[in-house]
């Protein structure tokens, strides 16, 4: 198992998660994507990481709706003002900050060898979020049930 994931899970259970008031899906806590981000940061500077060549190819900065420099964030906010996209972007930024604050500095204090504070800053966490958001997809794995009058696939016509 991953040392980073195990330590994060242990620390993540130390306090009750906080929830966004406007959306139950915006729960702060230790989710799969957060664990993936922590693993990414843990492996990023490890010269023995099997992922080191991949990490070398990744951008050092990003410009997305959630992760970008301050000027770009202000431009996006102005351009999207009054739209649902602006509200969602703002909520995602707040959630990212709260997710980080829920974990750090606690993880760095409890597991300094796994989560050294100098490698797990909020800027690093934002970078990991951008990598995760721009390089992963979610594919729903459920299929709708067949219509009630659908024939069985192996049934021979009568």
Image (spheres, rainbow, N blue to C red):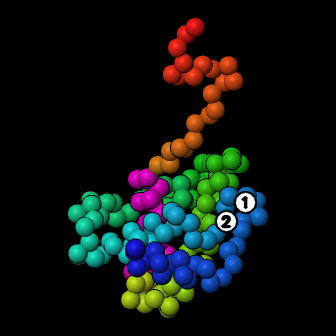
Majority secondary structure in the magenta region: helix
User: As displayed, is residue 111 above or below residue 146?
Assistant: below
Q: CA distance from mark 1 to mark 2?
A: 6 Å
User: Which quadrant is home to the N terminus?
Assistant: bottom left
Q: Are marks 1 and 2 in contact (CB under 8 Å)?
A: yes
Badge 2 is on which residue?
27
On whether residue 82 falls in the magenta region, the answer is no
On whether residue 128 falls in the magenta region, the answer is yes
Q: Position of residue 28 (x, y in %)?
A: 64, 69
Q: Give the mark count.
A: 2
Question: How busy is the neighbourhood of tag 2: few (under 14 within 10 Å), some, or many (20 plus)?
Answer: some
Whether residue 95 is visible, yes or no, is: yes
- Residue at image coords 68%, 74%: 17
- Residue at image coords 63%, 27%: 146
Whether residue 121 is visible, yes or no, is: no
Badge 1 is on which residue?
24
Q: Give the residue furthest to the right.
A: 21
Which one is nearer the viewer's eye here, 59 or 14? 14
Indicate the secondary structure of the residue bearing disc 1. helix
Q: What residue range appears in magenta? A: 118-136
User: As displayed, is residue 36 above or below residue 139?
Assistant: below
Query: For residue 19, what is the image quadrant?
Result: bottom right
Q: Position of residue 88 (x, y in %)?
A: 65, 54
- Residue at image coords 58%, 36%: 143
């Amino acid at each position: 198992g991953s040392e980073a994931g195990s330590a994060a899970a242990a620390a993540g259970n130390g306090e009750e998660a906080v929830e966004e008031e406007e959306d139950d899906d915006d729960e702060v806590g230790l989710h799969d994507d957060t664990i993936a981000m922590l693993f990414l940061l843990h492996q990023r500077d490890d010269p023995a990481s099997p992922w080191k060549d991949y990490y070398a190819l990744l951008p050092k900065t990003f410009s997305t709706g959630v992760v970008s420099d301050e000027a770009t964030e202000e431009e996006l906010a102005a351009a999207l003002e009054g739209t649902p996209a602006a509200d969602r972007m703002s909520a995602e930024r707040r959630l990212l900050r709260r997710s980080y604050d829920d974990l750090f500095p606690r993880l760095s204090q409890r597991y300094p060898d796994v989560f050294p504070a100098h490698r797990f800053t909020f800027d690093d966490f934002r970078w990991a979020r951008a990598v995760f958001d721009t390089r992963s997809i979610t594919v729903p794995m459920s299929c709708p049930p067949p219509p009630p009058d659908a024939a069985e696939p192996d049934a021979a016509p009568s």
